[in-house]
Image (cartoon, rainbow, N blue to C red):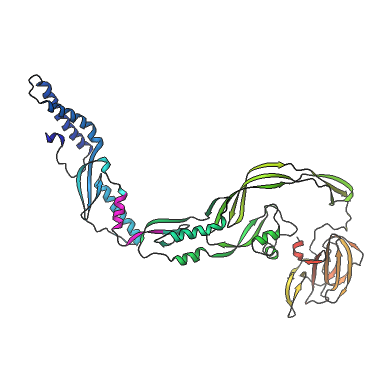
Amino acid sequence: MDEILYPGPQPEEAVGAAERRDWRETLRARAEDILFRWDAGREKRRLPARAFLLAALLVAVLTTVPTVYTRGYEVTVDGQALGIVSQKSEFENIVDRVEDRVGEILGYDYDLTCDVSYKSRIVERGEISSLSGFETYLFNQVDEVSKNYTFTIDGQNMGVLADATELEALLDELKAPYRNANTVSCEFTVPVRLDYSYTANGDTADMDALRELLTSNSVEAVTYTVRSGDTYSAIARSHDMTVDELMNINPDASLKSLMPDQVLTVRQNVPYLSVRSVDAVTYQEAIPAPVEYKEDDSMYQGDTKVLDPGEEGMALVSARITYLNGIEEARDIQTTRELSAPKTKVVAKGTKERPKTMAKGNFIWPVRGTITSRYGWRTLFGVSNFHGGLDIAVRTGTSVKAADGGKVITSAWHSSYGYYIIIDHENGKQTYYAHNSKLLVRVGERVYQGQVIAKSGSTGNTTGPHCHFEVRVNGQRVNPRNYLP
């Protein structure tokens, strides 16, 4: 009866669908034969009852064996049984993959030198082994490679480490200055990866060298977008610059004008690994008072006077602020809730026509030429001194024009300035025009913007013909370049 339960040895090749059907048909035929014999000889009791029961059991087995059992191959490598695969080709493919990968790591073709054998078995389907286990075993047989942490920045291999604990701590340390209680995300701007994978032995990186590289900085020129409420001094201070340094690298900028969304070039230390962080914040922000203008014919055009200052309102704002290396990059307003409404500001606006000689509040260039000496410290005749204006080289006799309207308060000779003129613009500002060859206006005259007031020359302490142009605000010399278009 044993031959009914077990179909006997099977060939080494994988059992195909047709073979499995033949096996089941053979068992089914045997079971049907037993049942037929039971029905035919039941009255004579020639067939034992246990044969009938056995046939019934076979019918049940026929419906369960194919779903529980399958043909498998026990894989043995160098005498060690590794597990069971459904097909020999599965393990052969794993060998090929391991050889290819080791070859990529080492840089040359690699062949596994191991003795592989297979033994055919009928096994439960759950006994089929995980293919990844075979792959790990084969990799571990290769003495030339081992598992390590591969460190890459933006796809570039930075080195291999046996232990990543110190590097992970360093990466967290680089992000730490940009994290606070409001931070919702903090990531490097380029992909930074630590992959645990097989590498060639002996490729371990120097952690001290990695630390020195990752903590290094470079000074670079970057752009900064002006936000409402910014000032030149605040922008310069936040980037470790002076206002003069900021203005020098932004020659088109003017101290008189700073507008939201204006883009400035700033200098800042840029870390080797830049960090972009996002903070979720809630803060109160003033709501500007709306302005109502009332015309006043007793005031000159362009003049204004506040009649009622009004009052700013207040809003509660929730926003997400994006920072690049701690410098605000973008602000996304999520919600705004008004806490108090603003009150209207009332301003009187002059409508009376301005006299031609009245200051407009903005300057024009007195002459057009090459700037030969800027505002600041310089060495002249071997002596270092502070130069309080701009020297603009022009030919002798070039027309010198008033930078703005005002009253002439000086038109005279000076040992250093030579023939020079001072115009008081009656708004806290005065302009100086020195080294002229001829003066064309007298003290007390009122002049208009663009009026020719002198002819250039090289009188006084000069090395050649030019116009020395100087601006003073409330009696203090300032950089004229900041007031010119």
Q: In the displayed orientation, state which residue is furthest to the front.
A: 181
For the C terminus, the image quarter is bottom right
Q: In the displayed orientation, state which residue is furthest to the bottom.
A: 382
In-image side of 460 versus 62 (left or right): right
- From the top left corner, tell me how far across and down residue 282 is, in percent: 63, 47
Q: Nearer the viewer, residue 402 or 316?
A: 316
Q: In the displayed orientation, state which residue is furthest to the top.
A: 43
- From the top left corner, tell me how far across and down residue 35 is, in percent: 14, 25
| 373 falls in the magenta region | no
Q: How many numbered dots are placed on residues in this image?
A: 0
The answer to whether 304 is drawn above or below residue 49 in the figure is: below
Magenta residues (range): 132-149
| 143 falls in the magenta region | yes
Q: Nearer the viewer, residue 311 or 37?
A: 311
- From the top left corner, tell me how far across and down residue 351 is, in percent: 87, 48
In-image side of 236 versus 479 (left or right): left
The quadrant in which residue 44 appears is: top left
Q: Nearer the viewer, residue 235 or 412?
A: 235
- Residue 23 in view, yes or no: yes
Q: Nearer the viewer, residue 186 or 120?
A: 186
The answer to whether 246 is drawn above or below residue 2 in the figure is: below
Residue that appears at 83% across and 71% down: 434
Residue that appears at 57% across and 62% down: 270
Residue that appears at 23% across and 49% down: 75
The quadrant in which residue 340 appears is: top right
- From the top left corner, tell me how far across and down residue 106 is, in percent: 34, 62
For the N terminus, the image quarter is top left
